[in-house]
Image (tube, helix red, strand yellow):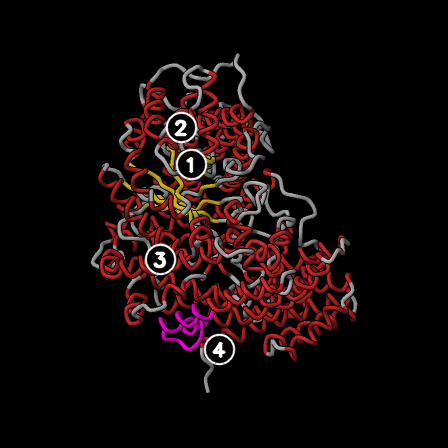
Amino acid sequence: MPVSAEAAADDRLREEVRLLGGLLGEVIRDEGGQDLYDRIEAVRVASVGYHRHPGAKGSAELERLLNELSLDDAVGLAHGFAVFSLLANVAEDRAGRRRARSQTAEGARPDTPEGALARLTAAGRTVEEARVLLSEALISPVLTAHPSEVRRKSVIDRIAAVSDLLDACDRPGFEEGGLACAPEVMKAGLRRQTVILWATRLVRTTGLVVQDEIDTVVSFLERVFLKVAPEQLIDWRRRLDAPDLKPFIRIGAWVGGDRDGNPNVDASALRAAFATLAKAVMRHYLEATNALGAELSLSGSLAKISPALKALAEGSGDGSPHRADEPYRRALSQIYARLSATHPILTGQTAPRPAPFAAPPYAGPGEFRTDLAVLHDSLVASHGAVFADDGLSRLIATVDVFGFHMATLDLRQNSDVHARVVGDLLKVAGVCDDYAALEEEARLVLLATELAAPRLLFSPYATYNPETLKERAILEAAAEALAKFGPDAIRTHIVSKTDAASDMLEVYLLLKEVGLYRPENPAACPIQAAPLFETIDDLRGARPTLERLFQEPCALAVAKARGVQEVMIGYSDSNKDGSYLTSTWELHEASRALLTVTQAAGLRLQLFHGRGGAVGRGGGSSFAGVLSQPTGTVAGRIRITEQGEVIANKYGEPDVARRNLDALTAGTLIASLAPPPDEAMTAKHGKTASALSVASMAAYRALVYETPGFVDYFRAATPINEIAELKIGSRPTSRTASTAIEDLRAIPWVLSWSQSRVMLPGWFGFGSAVQGQDMAELQAMAKAWPFFRTLVQNMEMIMAKSDMTIARRYASLVPDQTLAATIFGALQAEWDRTRDAVLAITGQAELLGGQPELNRLILLRMPYVEPLNHVQIELIRRRRAGDDDPRVREGILLAINGVAAGLRNSG
């Protein structure tokens, strides 16, 4: 009987998992000893037994083994399973890439360029319409420093090395047993990397500083995006027959500019971010220019050249007689020299390999591109299409995408900080003694008056609060960056915790203080204040807030100048505030309302989606997420945060990054030109969705905010306190010293519930909300409405990763077992209701019954994730009982690291 493609793919995945697991087992025996290996295997077997028989029979053997573990064995066991999680993820990622290639070969997937264009054609749209849309589009993944990536960069590098060794066997020419794929050669290389990984610390011993986060983000930009984004642009230019298509993918970043709740981000951090970005992109340009000089040895006596190239070569300071008749090399020597002279201006440091002669620096990337275009045009005109798509054309596309700034940095700060700083400035200037006491309309009148006045509030001779001086210094650094790198360096200042129009006017007033906003020409302000609506109440108030903002001529002028008003909507805090279902629905409705407001003002809406990796923070398929947006809210412009572990998972390797950038592009094209029937579905089912939202929020808040002792349960039945010691970010886990849920950041909130396998933020409240609803209507909604279908699928996926059997063991950590029984009972009952509701809506017999590939992948992970949970529980129990041995802490952090790696989108 022939083997199906799915079975063959599963077999190959299991084969690679066995290969990597077997190598790790050998390393553990050699490096850690046979006894450690035997204990690891015994705990794995007992964990499987507990999963199958969670009662007394299944737990007895597991409890015995865990209690008998010495500290060294516990740490070694956690380390072993964590490493295996990382290696198994390599095999899974490779299986995903093979599956994507296979599906593309069999027929155009809708999340590929071919599939998107086919979908548009089927909908009666033309290639010309796609060309016009992308010519004005902005599709921007924004890399943030949000701390949900628990892996060290050293670990990520080792995982990449393992993947590269296996990938070599997939390349053409190696299938028939090439040297690199000979079993003994490949296994030796894999074993070497496995030994290094085993002997590498998986957790950090010191906390991250902002520069660490900058370096991490820039490493992805330099290693992956510099290659992939220009290649994608060239490919789309070819597909659309649009050689001059402007870049539509623009990479954004928050590192060095996001100071909301992070006291470590200051003016020096912002300057360091731009300098680090510039070093990376200038290094690339210098190396690429040098490589072109080595390649383009064409002689002027043997090849025709254009007059423009002749002039460029003759103007070169390269006096070498060896290149006297090599115009391309002479021109490239001049280009290199100008780049070399530009390097210290942008970075503050001499170029790594300075030019041998002086030349004037480039005023901007436009001049650099113009020089490169002279070479390209001459080559194509004289020698034809063989030079139309080569290293030089790729370098030109790279300059188009990245300029000299490499990534557009956002500024972000909390509205409360802005209010205090503005109040301080106004008070010292003698304008208003108590700005904070003013009502909203009085604030707006005062702010508008100050924005129209030519004078500044700040005096170098006065005394201000340190916070005021810090904020002003950051904006001065922003002004310097704009002057040095151009208008794409910074375009947006995001205002967290926006709930009033004055929150944005405060930003413009602060920008005025550093010369970026000018009263006589508001439209010239290079930075737009963008509200961030985060809580449920803020989302519900988004429409009147934006309507009131547009009544202010200054804010409207800034928006009119760029034709767009950006608005950021937060998935994480709205979820923590009101439940997954309520958050998702309120985001949907706020988006529709904001579209109405911007259209009435003659503007386009640009939504910035503040998503995380976990479903509880807006995670899930980016392609499906774009398609589930309300009709008209995409329209060729979308920005999405890429946070923590998501960056490595989606952009860690060039081919994976390319696939994800293409999926974002495909989703944007389809959502803009051939959108799903969201408006009709909202009209038909909106009342039902709204009723579900209200009921879900009531059930969620009744548990999280209204149940006595819930905070105590949360802090005891999850590793929230231990997560604070992970040192995975430069900012604290809470906004204040309070233990209240309201003050806890969304990332540790979600990560804690993920570790304890409850996954509460991704599903709680849905089961209660569905009680008494028309199931036939809900089934119809899931079939025909992408918004609701995506919601259910994401919730189904996160529930499949939950495990209430393991969650019950975490509940045993709660000192008050009466409280534990009450709250865990509520969690279990709601989980059962939600599972039953999901199965009834999807018509499936089990979770993920309609997504068999995903189900198989999750089931493959669990045998090595679950032992980590059990070890984590045992070590937390010991630590809370008073064992302060540093190895206990180390083992807990290793277990947290391993569980996060196994679950993948846990933060």
The residue carrying mark 1 is 495
The residue carrying mark 3 is 693
Which residue type carries mark 2?
Answer: Glu
Residue at horizontal 34%, vertical 33%?
Answer: 501
Above/below status of 679 relative to 364: below
Label annotation for residue 7: 4
Task: Please identify the residue farthest to the left as the structure is shown.
Answer: 124
> Distance of mark 4 from mark 3, alpha carbons?
40 Å
Depth order, front residue of 874/71 = 874
Residue at horizontal 46%, vertical 71%?
Answer: 832
- Of the residues tagged 4 and 1, which is closer to the observer? 1
> Distance of mark 4 from mark 1, alpha carbons?
50 Å
The residue carrying mark 2 is 506
Q: Quadrant of residue 882?
A: bottom right
Mark 4 or mark 2, which has the lower sequence index?
A: 4
Contact (Cβ within 8 Å) of mark 2 with mark 3? no
Above/below status of 580 relative to 423: below
> Distance of mark 2 from mark 1, alpha carbons?
10 Å
Task: Please identify the residue farthest to the top as the structure is shown.
Answer: 461
